[in-house]
Every structure is written in C-alpha cells, then in structure tokens.
Amino acid sequence: MAPSVLPLLLWMIVPLLMTVYFSFINKKLMDPTAGGFVGLQNYVYLAGDPAFVPALINTLLFIGAVLIITVVAGVLLAVLYDQEFFGKNVAMLLVIAPFFVMPTVSALIWKNMIMHPVYGLISLGLQKIGLPAIDWFADYPMLSIIIIVSWEWIPFAFLILVTAIKSLDVEQKEAAAIDGAGPLTQFRYIVLPHLYRAITVVIMIETIFLLGIFAEIYTTTGGGPGTATTTLTFLVFALGLQQFDVGIASAGGILAVILANIVSIFLVRMLAKNLSQPS
C-alpha cells in the first residue's frame, strides 16, 4: 500500500505543515516585505477579532440545525419509501436529485428563483394569499443558509438510511404486527433502533463536510448581514483573501482543523461503540 499511501500523505501533510508555518509568521499578501516569527500573536489577534466568537457560534448552530433537519427528513423519507406506492422510482429520483446539483448552482437557484423577495416562488405564493413578501437573506440569513444546505444533504441521508432500512428483517415487523403493534410502535421499537448505526454514520460524514461549507454562503449572503452567516471557514477566507492576512487566516485554518478533528474523534468513538454492540 505504500506507493498509494505515500503520495496521499504528502498531499495532506505538506499543505498542513505550510499552514502551521504561516500561522506563526507575519505573512501578508499585499506586503511582500512583511515576515518574521511572531509566535502566538496571530492566534491572539484571531481570538480578539470581533467576528471570531460569532463565527464559532454560527458554525455550531449551522451544523446542529442541518444535522437535525437532514436526519429527521432522511428517516421519514426512508420509512415512506419502504412502503409500496405508485411511482416509487420517480419519487426516489426526485428525492436524490438535489444531490447532483453543484452547491453554487443550488445556492443561485434558491437565491434568485425561490427566496427572492420580488421574483421568488415563495414571495409569489405569499402574495397570492395576501401576505407580505419576505426578504429571506436580509431578515432570516442563517435560516436561509440552513434551508439551502439541508436541501442539498437530505438526499445523502436518505440514501444511507433507505439502504439500512432495506436490511431490516421483514419477519420482525410481521411478528410485531401479529402481536398487535401498530405502525408507530413498530417504528419506535424496531425500525428506529435498527437505523441507529446508519444515523451515526450520516452524522459523522455530514459533520466533517459541513465544517467546510463555503460556496452557499459566499454566493448568497457573503457572510452577512454583518457576521450573521459568517462561519469559521468563511472567516478564514475573509481574513486570507479579502484582508490578505495569510498569517491570521492560517491560524484560523489550524483552529478549524483542530475543531474538525475533535468532532471526528468523538463521532468515530461513538460509531465504534455502536458497532461493538449487538444489533
């Protein structure tokens, strides 16, 4: 495995080491003469940045909300798809379709065709019933981003969970039905425990990817209004490519890597614990 693993390690380690190096020096893109070792000064400056704490809170709020929406919607859709109904294949195609849309494209669709305060489908629908239009990205910016990203990731959760639910032994549900268990009771005591491991996998994979969400924020709100939709990833971009301070941006990148690793270790341990338990 060495010939394949070695290039992969270099591909990851070299950029990481460069980021660590830049986080300890005074590196500015607009000032080629800037340089020199500054120690933890970049980290101290980043911690004192007024946007840092809101960005951290926004990141946790954003990830938590998207995970709740995608897992709940994925479970419900998987349970519904497990039933027999007309047009089942078409329904699956419609559910997984958002997964094949590029993030920037889906963000533009939601921004200009669905959530636009004048031309959006939601505003037109509200006007038809006599309600005022809503400027989603001005009045509810974080909620708007959560809706867009959730729409993109529900298909992923659905595919994982519907595959898991197909592995459930039908005889268990038949035996429960003979004993008088209704659909809700079967869902609570048979289906949901069976899906627990799959839900853990969905949470772990989605969390890792959601920590790096950028295109949807940049395309719609640009991190605003103010810092309302500024996440840790977007803050790193703003510091590095808008304020041209690579040193502070690198410090933010290292903190993001640390946060991602903490979350990943916790989720991997939780997954390993679930896999070690009998189903």
Image: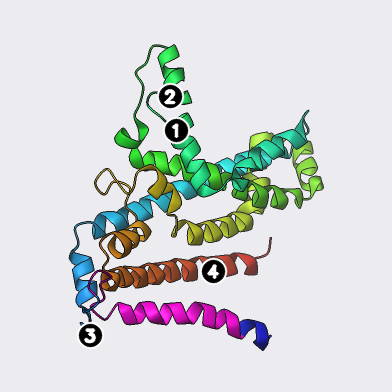
- Tell me if 151 is positioned left or right of 140 in this view: right
Residue 202 location, quadrant: bottom right
Locate the N terminus by quadrant. bottom right
Under tag 2, what secondary structure?
A: loop
Color scheme of the displayed model: rainbow
The stretch in magenta equals 6-31
Residue that label 2 marks: 119
Q: Which of disc 4 and disc 3 is earlier in sequence?
A: 3
Please tell me which of labels 1 and 4 falls first in the chain: 1
Q: Which residue is mark 4?
A: 268
Q: Circle 1 — which element?
A: helix
Residue 198 drawn in magenta: no
Label 1 vs label 2: CA separation?
7 Å
Q: Is residue 243 above or below residue 70?
A: below
Q: Earlier in the sequence, mark 1 or mark 3?
A: 3
Label 1 with label 2: CB-CB less than 8 Å: yes
Q: Looking at numbered disc 4 in the image, what kind of residue is underneath it?
A: Val
Q: Earlier in the sequence, mark 2 or mark 3?
A: 3
| Secondary structure of residue under mark 3 | loop
Numbered label attached to residue 37: 3
Which amino acid is tagged 2?
Tyr
Residue under the point 37% across and 50% down:
61
Return the disc, 4 or 2, that comes first in the chain's sequence: 2
Q: CA distance from mark 1 to mark 4?
A: 39 Å
Dot label at residue 166: none
Residue pictured at 70% horizontal, 34% vertical: 91
